[in-house]
Amino acid sequence: MPATSDILIRARRVVTPDGVRPASIRVSGGRIRAVESLDAAPSDGSDVVEASEEAVVMPGLVDTHVHVNEPGRTDWEGFRTATRAAAAGGVTTLVDMPLNSIPPTTTLEGLQRKLEAARGQCHMDVGFWGGVVPGNLSELPKLQEAGVVGFKCFLVPSGVEEFPHVTESELRPAMRALAEMDALLIVHAELPGPIDAAIEQEVIRNDRDPRRFQTFLRTRPRAAEDEAINLVIRLCRETGARAHIVHHSSSDALGALREARESGVRITAETCPHYLFFAAEDVPEGATEFKCCPPIRERENRKKLWAALESGVIDMIVSDHSPAPPEMKAISAGDFLEAWGGISSLQLRLAVVWTLLKERGLSLNQLAEWTARQPAHLVRLDKRKGAIEEGCDADMVIWNPEAKFTVEPAMIHHRHKLTPYMGQELYGVVEATYLRGEKIYERGEFSESPVGHLIIAGED
């Protein structure tokens, strides 16, 4: 699949900021130079790409919540496999989380190690989060100057010892510093207290069965999220910091988020496909591929998450792709209490979300808003990413929204094939993915060499 500098992409359905319409997209030098009428003539020497009658051309997806795990835990995923899987799913930009790699991205040295590991391996553009952990306050300005898009913290143990969680007394000065830097803080919002209390109660239950999802669900109560979000809102008001709640799952906290935003608190939130697709009542016994933290919750909770998306209380849908070797998921024992928590879905986000939107009668515009434009806006890449309009990078996905496929191991490009979506029939087949006008994926084939850039925040 050779690169080309000038192309004209024509399609009857192009998702633009002004709506879905027939259009020709003129690309030169890796940028969108114009969005014109369908019958626009190609420039001299440019190639023409004619999308099929059924196809949609949409901005390449932006995924701001991906655990790549390299260096140090590359046997869990890695930049090459993660970005290949993402390209096959129509993603053109991802942002790597600062934990699960060794070293974590909590120091300038850790970021430099991350950049070294990523160079020459990425099939798409990749940005990086820094981390807030106890004792690294002096590293935060260095990480921002070096180009991280923001900073992540945990309010509950993360699961890896090299990325410890912060308490309120540690979080407050960090948020003051980030406010002065105008840097974004993203928060894993669960507090240990409600979880510890729930675990104590679970130990004495007569019906405790670690193979049942409900057993695990009882150990991660909504109160852990609700109290954490109230803490973040309070500290945002106190410090003036910007905060974003990652992988939000508790519908009980939606009222607090709404009121905070209406009162001027700078706080946003995301949710993930698994919270919108699955319900706790339907998770099979021993199916630990469904385990994540916070957990998948009940159907009535899922319904309220959808309402929050449609009303704007939740801003976006990102993957929280958090893979691990199958043996860490305790598959043979089916023990939800011992299994690693994390769901693999990086390649499937477009299809999963579109399948749900199609069922609900929602639009292609909403799909692009929640999976491309809003994530790009979160990390201040929206002048280049997340939209098909003049001046943006020519990052696009051509896909068929009416075509169906069944999730099978052979089609998964993640390092490990285990996913709770296995066997699901989904709508939305990706035909081709373009990065800055260069085709990086087409019908199961990838560009010969990775051509992705490493995103350094603040650079043009």
Image (cartoon, helix red, strand yellow):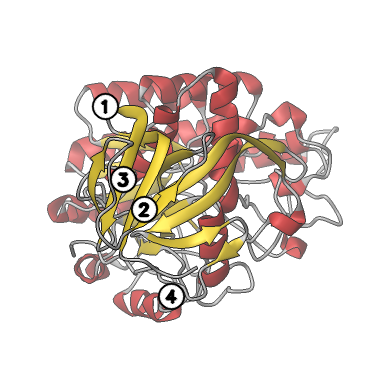
Q: Is residue 246 above or below residue 363?
A: below
- Determine the image quadrant of residue 428: top right
Q: What label sits on residue 395 in the rendered view?
A: 2
**Which of labels 3 and 2 is toward the front?**
3
User: Between disc 2 and disc 4, whose residue precedes?
Assistant: 4
Q: Residues within 10 Å of mark 3 (few under 14, many from 20)?
A: many
Residue drawn at the location 64% of the way across and 61% of the way down: 413
Q: Which residue is mark 3?
A: 25
Q: What label sits on residue 118 in the rendered view?
A: 4
User: Between disc 3 and disc 1, whose residue precedes?
Assistant: 3
Q: Tell me the CA gap for discs 3 and 2.
A: 11 Å
The kind of residue tagged 1 is: Arg
| Frontmost residue, 40 versus 13 | 40
Q: Which residue is mark 1?
A: 261
Query: What is the x, y in percent for residue 240?
Result: 17, 41
User: Between disc 2 and disc 1, whose residue precedes?
Assistant: 1
Q: Is residue 250 above or below residue 335?
A: above
The kind of residue tagged 3 is: Ile
Q: Is residue 35 above or below residue 259?
A: below
